[in-house]
Image (cartoon, rainbow, N blue to C red):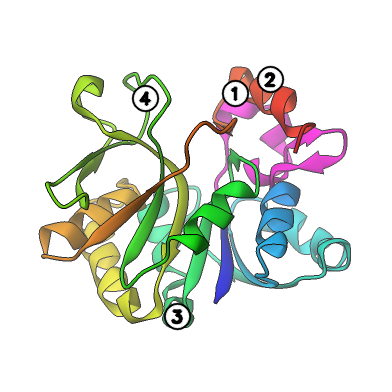
């Protein structure tokens, strides 16, 4: 199984940091960046072959590649999203589809969380796609929310959902079993072809709509944050030093 980090995003709401860096390389604990935490977590889970999807300011990741490999004992393969500044992340994840067949533990490059999330996913792995879900947090409008069917599998995943009916928030970490790879890649392709501004989570919904099963793994009470703006960055800096 491979690790995978989506790190192609520009993160315009984090300027001036992201004038010269992709969002994943914004520091959150001294010189430690969001990507440092992602790589450290994956390595701690035993995943040392890691694919990084790059796009915006890809050269900044390329310049640090050897240093990051030495620091975390990993081997990084960079794959380039040529539409990173134009299209959303359904296309970004699709660009790494050739690796799905090996099995992938995917993490978003803008999420700061402890390694317990990766451990939870690996402990709960089964025959299907598996999403890490925060079922404790109080939800609002911006979160990527989920509802579940009577069997506990994913029914809907979207930000456009009444928080009151949601079972939790998807936190940007997914375990993709290899045999699901072709079906997921096709669902992602259909998603970005329909609208290149859609999220990869819309690709998950497409997979469900086609009859695919997507399971969830509750992470419990965990300090984590998706870093979209400067308020999120402040929160990331409060928690990252404790990991």
Residue 82 visible in the snapshot: no
**SS of the residue under disc 2:** helix
Q: Which residue is mark 1?
A: 232
Q: Which residue is mark 3?
A: 98
Q: Is residue 20 above or below residue 215?
A: above
Name the disc covering residue 234, or none: 2
Q: Which residues are magenta?
A: 6-34
Mark 2 in CB contact with mark 3 (< 8 angstroms): no
The answer for how far apart the CA atoms under marks 1 and 4 are is 13 Å
Q: Earlier in the sequence, mark 1 or mark 3?
A: 3
State the quadrant of the N terminus: bottom right
Mark 2 in CB contact with mark 1 (< 8 angstroms): yes
Q: Earlier in the sequence, mark 4 or mark 2?
A: 4
Badge 2 density bin: few <14, some 14–19, many ≥20, Cα 10 Å: few
State the quadrant of the C terminus: top right
Q: Earlier in the sequence, mark 2 or mark 3?
A: 3
The answer for how far apart the CA atoms under marks 4 and 3 are is 31 Å
The answer for how far apart the CA atoms under marks 2 and 1 are is 5 Å
Name the disc covering residue 142, or none: 4
The answer for how far apart the CA atoms under marks 2 and 3 are is 36 Å
């Amino acid at each position: 199984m491979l690790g995978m980090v989506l790190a192609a995003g520009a993160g315009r709401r984090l300027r001036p940091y992201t004038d010269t860096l992709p969002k994943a390389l914004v520091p959150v604990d001294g010189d430690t960046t969001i990507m440092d935490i992602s790589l450290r977590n994956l390595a701690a889970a035993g995943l040392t072959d890691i694919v990084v999807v790059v796009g915006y300011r890809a050269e900044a990741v390329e310049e640090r590649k050897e240093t990051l490999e030495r620091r975390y004992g990993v081997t990084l393969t960079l794959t380039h999203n040529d539409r990173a500044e134009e299209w959303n992340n359904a296309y970004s994840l699709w660009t790494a589809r050739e690796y799905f067949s090996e099995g992938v533990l995917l993490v978003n490059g803008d999420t700061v969380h402890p390694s317990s999330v990766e451990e939870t996913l690996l402990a709960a792995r089964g025959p299907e796609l598996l999403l890490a879900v925060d079922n404790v947090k109080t939800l609002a409008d911006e979160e990527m929310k989920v509802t579940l069917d009577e069997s506990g599998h994913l029914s809907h995943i979207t930000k456009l959902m009444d928080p009151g009916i949601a079972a939790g928030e998807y936190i940007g970490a997914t375990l993709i079993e290899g045999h699901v790879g072709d079906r997921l890649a096709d669902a992602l392709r259909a998603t970005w072809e329909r609208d290149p501004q859609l999220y990869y989570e819309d690709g998950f919904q497409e997979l469900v709509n086609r009859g695919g099963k997507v399971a969830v793994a509750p992470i419990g009470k965990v300090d984590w944050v998706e870093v979209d703006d400067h308020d999120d960055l402040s929160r990331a800096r409060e928690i990252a030093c404790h990991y």
